[in-house]
Image: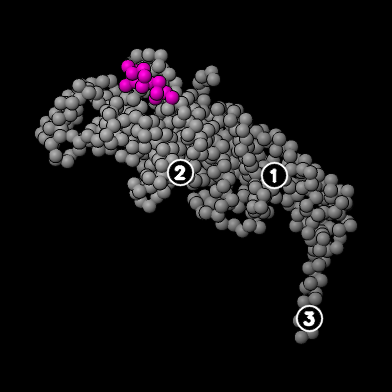
Amino acid sequence: MAQQERIQQEIAFSTPLVSNKVNISFLNKEYTDDDNVYQRKIQDLGSKYGHVRTTRRDGNCFYRAFGYSQLEALMDNPKELQRFKAVAAKSKNDLVALGFPEFTIEDFHSTFMDLIEMVERQISEAELLAAFNEQNTSDYVVVYLRLLTSGYLQKESAFFEHFVEGGRTVKEFCSQEVEPMAKESDHIHIIALAQALNISIRVEYMDRGDCGGVNQHDFPEGSSPGVFLLYRPGHYDILYKL
Amino acid sequence: MSGSRKQAPTTATKRLKQDYLRIRKDPVPYVCAEPLASNILEWHYVVRGPEKTPYEGGLYHGKLLFPREFPFKPPSIYMITPNGRFKCNTRLCLSISDFHPDTWNPAWSVSTILTGLLSFMVERGPTLGSLETSDSTRRQLALQSGAYNIRDKVFCELFPNLVEEIRKEAESTAVDRKSGVGVCVSNGFVGSSHDPAARGPADPADQMAGEGGVNQHAGILGGAFANLVVIVGFAAFAYTVKYILRSITQE
């Protein structure tokens, strides 16, 4: 436990929460040249995506990657921005209705709304990136997205209970695997968050499985995604279409 | 809202200040909490034992130590007043405490923590730092809690209202005794708060006095009264011994 914490700290100080945008070829360097499976998959990825932004491997990467990517995408889509803002504004009441403590949810919600309003005021990409690299602001967004995910899972618990492992109730699952910081995300979290905010996320799955290219998956299925994430075992980064 | 920068990091400070305003504006039943003026990361709380529990009438003082990473990491929770449920001055292992950072939810506030502590206190589930004691011991400790608390400097500094309450309670019990209204335990509760504080240690003496049939002497000053009780108690004991010895010799 202490060992794990120390390693997490080391990682924390060595990488930014959300990195600058780099060319997709950056990924090549993360694997050895003779790692054929990954090199081939990166090549496949490169045929669809031009750039990547990495996130810190702190267990919150899905929420952070999604949060940044979604807000960045809203920068040049004022119409979608207004829709998203309305959904986000209303979301707090939904959580309160579900029994979350209004007391503190307020803080996280207002940080999230502040960022949306910054985007509305047409701040630069650099400013948005700076906000996401400010640990507290960034973590407050992560907390709020976790709460939204938990809220949606609980609201639709009749459906999601079939996907919860280990004989737990949806509520138990949420308090153990969704709400605490640094808990990693799986399909079920992504589905819930996408539906809670009524947006679409595409995840490109890249693992050691020897099947040629990367597998893509849209949440919810059949939607047309505005956020593109790269999944490698245990981690999510942000992708940019060519 | 001014970004004061003491040794505590701004997020934790800001959040704890807000929690303080909230708990003031919207108090939680049975609970009050105050941060130290010198260190916002250390809070002291008092939980009032709920009715119909062995803790009824008790005032339980304890502290919360918040990490610099609050609200992303949980506080540690300590109980100071002897209560029979939790060990004193020991980090308690609860889902809301720092024993379980993996189940901590950053949306939990000081109010949530203390409500959680209270509900766990009145349950019977064991955990690290919990004690197994009888309900009567817990009741006894509840009665003694006020007297214990007013000996604590921090308690007196942070909770002057409660100190006042405990003192008044002690006085009203003493007045009852002096005016010879009788030593019925329930008198202290009428029209006042629920803390029987200083009555605690005198309680068994009251009962013995009743049994010994010396109720009418209750108006005498406390010290003399206690002495009398001891004498009567001893006399009763001597009689009992004498009776037993006699019945043995008769057989």
| Discs 2, 3: same chain | yes
- In the image, which residues are magenta? A72-86
Q: Which mark is residue B146?
A: 1
Counting from the top left corner in percent of width and height, residue B123 is at 56, 52
Residue type highlighted by circle 2: Phe
Q: Are marks 2 and 3 in contact (CB under 8 Å)?
A: no
A129 relative to A143, above or below? above
Q: Secondary structure at mark 1?
A: helix
Residue B157 visible from this viewpoint:
yes
Q: Are marks 3 and 1 in contact (CB under 8 Å)?
A: no
Counting from the top left corner in percent of width and height, residue B96 is at 49, 42
Q: Identify which residue is drawn at 42% across, 23% down.
A: A85
The answer to which image quadrant residue B114 occupies is: top right
Q: Secondary structure at mark 3?
A: helix
Q: Give the label, 2 or 3, closer to the camera.
A: 2
Query: Mark 3: few, some, or many residues within 10 Å (few <14, many ≥20)?
Result: few
| Discs 2, 1: same chain | yes
| Discs 3, 1: same chain | yes
Which residue in the protein does label 2 denote? B99
